[in-house]
């Protein structure tokens, strides 16, 4: 999740003024991204919501759906220092975090110097993350949760803000490794990318096969993004929305009293899922121009927030059920 932000209380007038300013800036961000990414409004919305909420996103889709292009575009539009890591089976943790090298000065004295890896960025693209071994993937665990890394017993803080947007191909199984559950839980949302609609694909054909390609324009900077993220954490959450989040997340766990969940779910989401839903609901409300989230936000965000934090039983899979089916039933009951 995001770092805890403790700042003085803001009056209602100041809150409204800041929200209006943030809403105008978010509108410019959406317009700038739309110049390069055609269609896929839901994908752009969920990815931006994940970043505005201060978290990380896992983009899942077949090749050619502009996952990499979207991450690169967001880095430019939001003014973040972006780095890319191409995950491969031979990638080592030191290739991500960095390593210590021995140096010798003019007097012959030797010492170690830490050389930072590509993880020291504000926006890290982990391309095809499931192609690296679990040992290498685990190098991201500490950074994604605690926003620092430890190498040779020394702590090294990461830039702020720090976001990981990882891409994954759901089709190819050969040469890939499943992501550890602990790492999946650190992604605020899993964002599934489907094929574009006809009108969007027509525009892609016309505008991307010529001489000139559209270029993204910078709209925000890192400091302003952090201010908007702080504003989102200050937004009030109605008691009814809190109750809906708790009911939804707890009903997705076996042993919670829901007979169908007990039959179909092997393990369910933990408290981090409730935190993610709360933050994402706030961010989505501001994205839509509202000052407080609603239960509709909880329903709409249930699938991307919960689907990678749950697993089905063997019996449920044998019946042809999917995690989406279970979440849809639970969200409808909220």
Image (cartoon, rainbow, N blue to C red):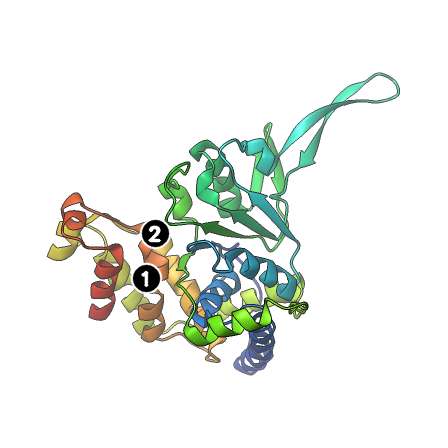
> As drawn, is 92 to the left or to the right of 78?
left
Where does the image place residue 220, in percent across and percent down from the top left? 65, 68
How packed mark 2 is, by other alpha carbons closer than 10 Å (few <14, some 14-19, many 20 or more), is many
Cα separation, mark 2 vs mark 1, equals 9 Å
The dot on residue 287 is none
Instruction: Give the quarter of the image for residue 226.
Output: bottom right
Q: Mark 2 — residue? A: 308
Q: Residue at x 19, y 55 (%)?
A: 321
Can residue 177 be seen?
yes
Position of 54 relative to 140 (above/below) = below
Give the residue furthest to the right. Answer: 106
Lower sequence index among marks 2 and 1: 1
- Tag 1's secondary structure? helix
Q: How many marks?
A: 2
Query: Eyeballing the image, is 132 above or below 200?
Result: above
Question: In front here: 125 or 9?
Answer: 125
Residue 202, x across and y down, in percent: 49, 73
Direction left: furthest residue: 259
The residue positioned 11% from the left and 55% from the top of the image is 259
> Residue 19's quadrant in the figure?
bottom right
Residue 92 in percent (x, y) is at: 54, 31
Nearest the viewer among 130 and 227 is 130
How far across and how far down the image is residue 142, in percent? 50, 40
> In the image, is residue 155 above or below residue 281?
above
Q: Is residue 238 left or right of residue 248?
A: right
Q: Residue at x 57, y 81 (%)?
A: 20
47 and 111: which one is in front? 47
Per the image, label 2 sits on a secondary structure element best described as helix
Please name the residue that numbered disc 1 is placed on: 303
């Amino acid at each position: 999740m995001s770092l805890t932000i403790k700042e003085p209380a803001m009056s209602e007038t100041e809150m409204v003024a800041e929200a209006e300013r943030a809403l105008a800036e978010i509108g410019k961000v959406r317009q700038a991204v739309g110049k390069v990414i055609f269609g896929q409004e839901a994908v752009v919305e969920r990815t931006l919501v994940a970043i505005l909420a201060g978290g990380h996103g896992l983009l899942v889709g077949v090749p050619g759906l502009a996952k990499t292009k979207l991450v690169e575009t967001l880095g430019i539009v939001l003014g973040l220092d972006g780095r890319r890591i191409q995950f491969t089976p031979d990638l080592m943790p030191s290739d991500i975090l960095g390593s210590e090298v021995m140096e010798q000065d003019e007097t012959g004295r030797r010492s170690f110097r830490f050389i930072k890896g590509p993880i020291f960025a504000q926006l890290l693209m982990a391309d095809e993350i499931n192609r690296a071994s679990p040992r290498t993937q685990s190098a991201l665990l500490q950074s994604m949760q605690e926003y620092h890394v430890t190498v040779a017993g020394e702590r090294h803080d990461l830039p702020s803000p720090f976001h990981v947007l990882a891409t994954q191909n759901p089709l190819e199984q050969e040469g890939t490794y499943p992501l550890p559950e602990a790492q999946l839980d650190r992604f605020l949302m899993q964002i599934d990318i489907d094929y574009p609609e006809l009108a969007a694909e027509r525009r892609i054909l016309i505008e991307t096969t010529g001489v000139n390609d559209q270029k993204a324009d910078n709209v925000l900077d890192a400091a302003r993004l952090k201010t908007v993220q702080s504003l989102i954490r200050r937004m009030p959450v109605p008691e009814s929305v809190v109750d809906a989040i708790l009911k939804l997340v707890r009903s997705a766990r076996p042993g919670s009293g829901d007979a169908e969940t007990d039959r179909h779910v092997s393990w369910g989401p933990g408290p981090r899922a409730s935190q993610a839903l709360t933050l994402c609901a706030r961010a989505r409300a501001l994205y839509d121009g509202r000052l407080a989230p609603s239960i509709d936000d909880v329903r709409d965000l249930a699938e991307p927030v919960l689907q990678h934090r749950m697993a089905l039983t063997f019996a449920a899979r044998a019946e042809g059920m999917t995690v989406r089916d279970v979440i849809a039933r639970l969200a409808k009951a909220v």
